[in-house]
Image (cartoon, rainbow, N blue to C red):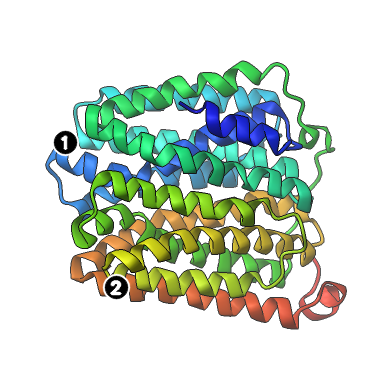
Amino acid sequence: MLQAPVRLLYTLRPNIPAGVFAATAVSTIVFTATPFLVNGVADEFDIDVETVGIISTFQLAGFMIASWGAGRFFRPRRRMMLIAAIVGIVANLVSGLTPSFSMLLGARFVSGISLGLIAWISWAEVFGDAERVGDVAVIGPIVGTVASPIIAAVIDTSGTDWLFIGFAALYLWPLAFVRSTHLDAAKRPPRQRHRPTRAAAAILVALGLNTFGGSAVFVFAASIGADLVGLSPVLVSLAFSANALASIPSARFRGQRQLPGMWMGITGILAVLLASVTVAPVYWIALPLWGFSFWMAVPGAFSLLAERSHYPDERAGDAQAIMALGRVFGPLYGGLLYSISPTALGVGGGGVILIAAIAMLYIEWRIHPEVIGDLVGTE
């Protein structure tokens, strides 16, 4: 089922190791499932939709811990990729076989550790290289385009248990490439870590706020489409495919990404519209545009972070960790707002993204690379 996106990715000739390519594709599929799992798990365990949103929190908590800690205590070697794949297999098998919601949460936490290790390895390999950043970034949108309807169909016909078992099987793909994968990041000599400049720290906070507000809304996007807009599961999955498809040109873009703050601001406005104006035309417009603007904003923010840092490779793990931290608490925040009203969710989630956008614009316009040392000190 995944042959089509894989063929398309290879035609784009990504300049990254095969193991990184495969692992990133699998992790994208697992992350793509989260909005669809909310309703599926709620039905299977007879739990409120707002409560089930915590499944994303647990998975992303594991992601945050792994992506933050891995760069501080380990090196991005093949051994770590092997561990990530094995942990992913075990976590998803347990998720598919567990009889209780609490055990499912624990298994998703472990799944997050696998995903965090994969993200750390992938971004450490390309961070600071604008062309290769695009090679990693484009994997998500292309795979997500095809994965969304497949995930929705599996949940609708077989339930979430078989979906998790399918995820476990998918991890065999990157596992097959471990021995032949050579990571450039592993060859870089280890060195003492340094604190980020104040400009870099501010960018990291903005990235965290962006994912905090974005995940608060996005994790409930499938529920909004089905319960409030009135779309069928198939149409909701197609809307998510449109979101991923619209992300491809922006993720693949190889030029200089200007004004990531502006694109964050657009994402914030779309988050407000998606949750507040629950009619089909707005849903179909907002979700694809969200994908395009998000993938213009985040790689652009990564480039800005590298430019405003004296040690940009050290910031790769920091960026993934702070974004994961935002995603950890975003669904909790979103669930609280969603229980009040969809409008509260849209304004509360989108408003946080807009705050991040303003901070990002200020940094790009007012703090330039050549004067970092004079204005904000050194790392």
Residue 196 visible in image: no
In the picture of the structure, the residue carrying the numbered disc 2 is: 277
Label 2 secondary element: loop
Instruction: Tell me the residue at 27%/74% (across/down).
Output: 343
For the N terminus, the quadrant is top left
The CA distance from mark 2 to mark 1 is: 29 Å
* Mark 1 neighbour density, 10 Å: few (under 14) some (14–19) many (20 or more): few
Number of residues whose C-alpha sits closer than 10 Å to that of mark 2, classed few (under 14), some (14–19) or many (20 or more): some
- Residue drawn where x is 23% and y is 40% of the image: 40
In the visual, does 228 lie left or right of 198?
Answer: left
Image coordinates of residue 306 in percent, x first then y, are 76, 60
* Residue 279 image-quadrant placement: bottom left
Name the residue located 51 percent from the left edge and 36 percent from the top edge: 27
Q: Residue at x 24, y 48 (%)?
A: 52
Specify the amino acid type for callout 2: Val
Q: Earlier in the sequence, mark 2 or mark 1?
A: 1
Q: Residue farthest to the left?
A: 46
Q: Give the percent coordinates (x, y) of residue 347.
A: 35, 76
